[in-house]
Each structure stands twice: as structure tokens, then as C-alpha cells.
Amino acid sequence: MAAVAVDSAMEVVPALAEEAAPEAAGLSCLVNLPGEVLEYILCSGSLSAADIGRVSSTCRRLRELCQSSGKVWKEQFRVRWPSLMKHYSPTDYVNWLEEYKVRQKAGLEARKIVASFSKRFFSEHVPCNGFSDIENLEGPEIFFEDELVCILNMEGRKALTWKYYAKKILYYLRQQKILNNLKAFLQQPDDYESYLEGAVYIDQYCNPLSDISLKDIQAQIDSIVELVCKTLRGINCRHPSLGFKAGESSMIMEIELQSQVLDAMNYVLYDQLKFKGNRMDYYNALNLYMHQVLIRRTGIPISMSLLYLTIARQLGVPLEPVNFPSHFLLRWCQGAEGATLDIFDYIYIDAFGKGKQLTVKECEYLIGQHVTAALYGVVNVKKVLQRMVGNLLSLGKREGIDQSYQLLRDSLDLYLAMYPDQVQLLLLQARLYFHLGIWPEKSFCLVLKVLDILQHIQTLDPGQHGAVGYLVQHTLEHIERKKEEVGVEVKLRSDEKHRDVCYSIGLIMKHKRYGYNCVIYGWDPTCMMGHEWIRNMNVHSLPHGHHQPFYNVLVEDGSCRYAAQENLEYNVEPQEISHPDVGRYFSEFTGTHYIPNAELEIRYPEDLEFVYETVQNIYSAKKENIDE
């Protein structure tokens, strides 16, 4: 084979072009190069897929080099969509040209659907049947997800509306897949004790946009196990746990050897790695997510116990979970194997309290009450997950700022996946859908969600007739109101009744009294809220009362508020507003203001021109003063 020195593929092609003036001579020179050099040139990244297609049609040798299952098309696929390569095995036969076509088609379809969402769902939450277009698409789901991730990762402050709906679609797709996996997991027999796997499903469902996997979390735990083994080796270099291989489920029966493992665990977890119970921020959902427990090295009793239990079992100590009231515990058997045991034959371990070992009396002292022996019993995986989700459900009910109630919705979904006939939770879910206005795209499809839930409740518990009847009545009234709705309400700044409106959508404002930063996404010439709201918010105490313009604003803390004009002022140092719904209303942040998307601009067609004038007057004048 001829030796050819090639510094880079980009240098080869120009050199060939200079040597061969006639096109035919140039092609002949190119194809006479060694195969490795030609492949290097074609895989250099300087040629697009279209270029490769044209090159492969010139002659047989180049066509063979660009075969559909070869390295050239594999490189084209890898460069274009690198995150997808993890789904392919090096030993698999793959038609890379066909994969490229399918992925490209999936991307175009995904973008088409994302683009349609703003027009379809601008005035309401995405409904329960709103994702049917995505579900019915042909092709691998991972390709659609990858395109949605590409949209979310678009650089800059543009395409905010695309990112908003891409996020919602991706959230839905991943949650559906995780929920199906959880339901399959729950069908395992009661003796299937993979507590960590169940906890990871809960973590994934509540954080579907995060890259969370059981494999990664197990790898982090394995690294902790290695540290424990290192410490254990210093205590007892012949300890049997040191000989365990990854994945083994062997158990050590001698109490003294088990005690050595627990001592080493306590040293590594609490002294070396500084894990601790989160007493300062106990009611934070992050304390229940296993990936966050490992990152932040803190949690609440149940999450800390699952971590402790997983490590102990990998090292041969058969700890068991105890669903103790108010404080989840682990128990460690001290009795002889095969003997009849009672609650006093166990030591109880408080993983939240740095692995402290407790007697029965100390457990009762911990919670300040006497409990029956049944509450010291071991619980299965499903009961442990029920308690975790129950904690999330309680936190979801406490939500104040997040007006989407996402945590409450997620925890309800998880709880009802485990216990689908919980009447009170079904009622709560129906009320939540009603409160949020999560209606289907077509009014009568409402039966598929709220009325379906209500009918199921009525079947389970006829005693709930009053509550069900109330919700059914209001649901049907909503359908009638939807029928009567006319077209989009358009508000013109030039209209005489809007003459007192001073600010426009897209402007970054500051609240004079509370100091929060916000962006305007709507306005009314006077307060449009009811008398009760006006009274509760003490609007009458304002100098101009409710007879002044009021503005719908997205606040930096994630809330949505309705602010009086006299309480707002221009923010002389505008900044992006970190609110989850910004993309629902705006397509871009310019650095001084937000640009409304097409749907919002239809409703306020004259505001954008006013925004440009305002920005020019406010921020240009400020810049001139600074320059002087």
C-alpha cells in the first residue's frame, strides 16, 4: 500500500483540486487513493449527508466506501446525533443510512408537532388527550425524545415557546414510560426486595427531564461500598464481606461480624462523607429523591434508611425496613436463627440519626408515644414506596408558589398507580383537574378524564354521591361555557377605553411595594377580579382603587400575580424572569424585554410597537448617562 502523509482531511481535497484541473482527472486521482485515506476524508466532518450522497453516486469504489452499514454513514449519524450512540451495541449490524433517514424524519415530525402546540393550547393547559399526535407517530420513541432534547438545548434566549412545549411533551413521554415500568415492577412477588429500584422509579417520575438511572445510582452506592470495605479491612482484614463480588446476595450470620460492617458504614457515611439527616429543610421534596440524597448527602428518615439498607445488604448484613410512625427505621436481628422472635430481639437503627442503634423503649422515646408491637414489623417494597409517595403527596398539598401543582399531580399519579381505588385521592385528582382547567382539546372528550374519574368514584363508594354530583355539575357547566365561547379577545392600545394603560406586554417591571421582578403578559383597563378578591387583597386602600389598569405578571419566584398599575415601575436593570411559563407567552428575550409569541401578539397587536418606544426611551437614555 502506498504511503500517503495526510495532515488533515481538509488539506487533502484542495491539494487534489490543484493537481487535477479537469474534473475527470480529479475524480480519478481521488479514487486512486488508499481506502483508509478516502474513508478518513469522507469521515472528516467537513462533508454533509447530502455531500456523501452525491459522492457515493459518482463511481463504484466510492459507492462501496459509502455503503449504508459502513463507517462513513455511522460517522454522519454520530456527528449529527451523538447522544443516540449509547443505544447501539458495537456488535450489532446497523443500516446507518436508514437510521439516519428515520431519525431525520422523526425530527421533522417532532418539530412540526411542537410548532402546532402554541396555537392549539395557548389559552389552556395542554389537555389529557393533547399528546395523542406524539403517541401515534411512527418510528423509535428515542428519536422523538432526542429531537425534543435538541430543541431544549438550543443556545441563546430565542425559541422560548418551542422550548416550553418541547419540555412539556418530553415530560409526558418520559413519565408514561416510567409509569409503565413502575406498574410492571409492582407486579413482582412480595419477596422481591429491590427497594432501591422502586425508589429510583419514583425519583425518575418526579424528575423526568433529569438523567437518572438505576445503573448510575447503583454505581455511586458501589463507590461508597468500596470505601466501607477499605475501612472494614482496617478493622478485620479477613472479614468475609471483603470477598463478596458485585451482585452477590450472600448474608453474614455472625452478629459480631455484622456489627463490624455497621461500624465501618457509620464511619464512612457520617464521619468521612458527612451524610446527615436534613433537619433544617425537612419538608423539601429533594430529600426523597435518591439521586439528590447522594448529591446533597442529606435526606429524611426513609430515604436515608433506603441508602443505609442497600449498602448493608451488599455487605452481607440482613437489615429490614420498619414502617415506624413519624420516623422510618431499620431493624437488625439479634436472636438466634430459627428461634421465635419478638420486637425485643431486634436493635432498631436510625439512619437519619447517624446510624444510632435503639432499643424498643428508645424508639418510643424518639417519637414521644407508645406504639403497638405490630408497628415494629417489617414491610415489603410496595409499603415502603407507598410511604415515600405519601410523603410527596403531603408536600404537594403544601405547595404555595407552584401554581401548576406539578408535585401534587405527580404524587397522585404514583399513588393511584399503586392503589387505583383510593376514593379520596380520586376525588382530589378530579378537583385538581377541575381547578387547573386541564380540559381536553374538544369539550366532550372531558368524559375521558374528569367524568371518568367521577364515575369510578361513584362505583367504589356510593356514599360520595354529594361530592361527585357537585363536580359533575360544574364539569358539565364548563362544557356549556366552552360551547358559548367566541373568538379571541383583542385589546388595542388605540381604543379609547384603554387610554389609561401605561405599560405593555413583554416589559420587565419591578413591584414598588414588594420589590419583586416580573414580566407583563396581559393587562385589563380596570380590575376584572370579583368583589371578594378585591376585598381580600385590600384593593380599595390603593389611591386609585380598582378603577385603574391591572396587569397579569409572571414573577421571578415562579408565581403569577395580578398587579395594580400604580404598584409597578420600569425595572432599570432588566433581567430574565425565571418563570416556568415564560415560553408560553414569549418567543425571545432581547436583554431588555420579551418579544410576545404569535398567539399573544394576536391578543395585543399594538403593544409591541409601544414596547420598542419604551425600551428606546428608558434604556437608551440610561446608556447615554453612563457614557457621559
Image (cartoon, helix red, strand yellow):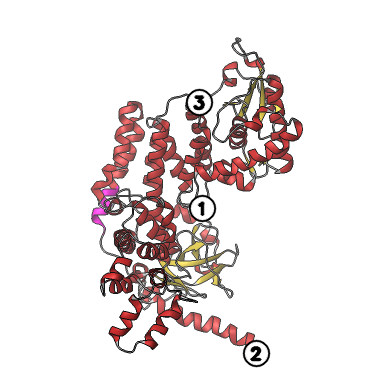
How far across and down, in percent of the image, does residue 555 sit? 52, 61
Tag 2 residue? 628
Q: Describe the element under mark 1 as helix, strand or loop.
A: helix
Q: Describe the element under mark 2 as helix, strand or loop.
A: loop
- Residue at 25% x, 52% y is 442
**The residue positioned farthest toward the front in the image shown:** 1
Tag 1 residue? 536
Numbered range of the magenta stretch: 478-485
Nearer the N terminus, badge 2 or badge 3?
3
Camera-side residue of 145 and 104: 104
Q: Describe the element under mark 3 as helix, strand or loop.
A: loop
Q: Which of the two marks, 2 or 1, is nearer to us in this view?
A: 2
The correct choice, above or below, for 72 with respect to 303 in the image is: below
Amino acid type at circle 3 is: Asn
Amino acid type at circle 1 is: Asn
Tag 3 residue? 380
Q: Does the magenta stretch include residue 480?
A: yes
Q: Which of the two marks, 2 or 3, is nearer to us in this view?
A: 3
Camera-side residue of 426 and 38: 38
Marks 2 and 3, how far apart at CA: 72 Å
Marks 3 and 1, how far apart at CA: 48 Å
Left or right of 116, for residue 622: right
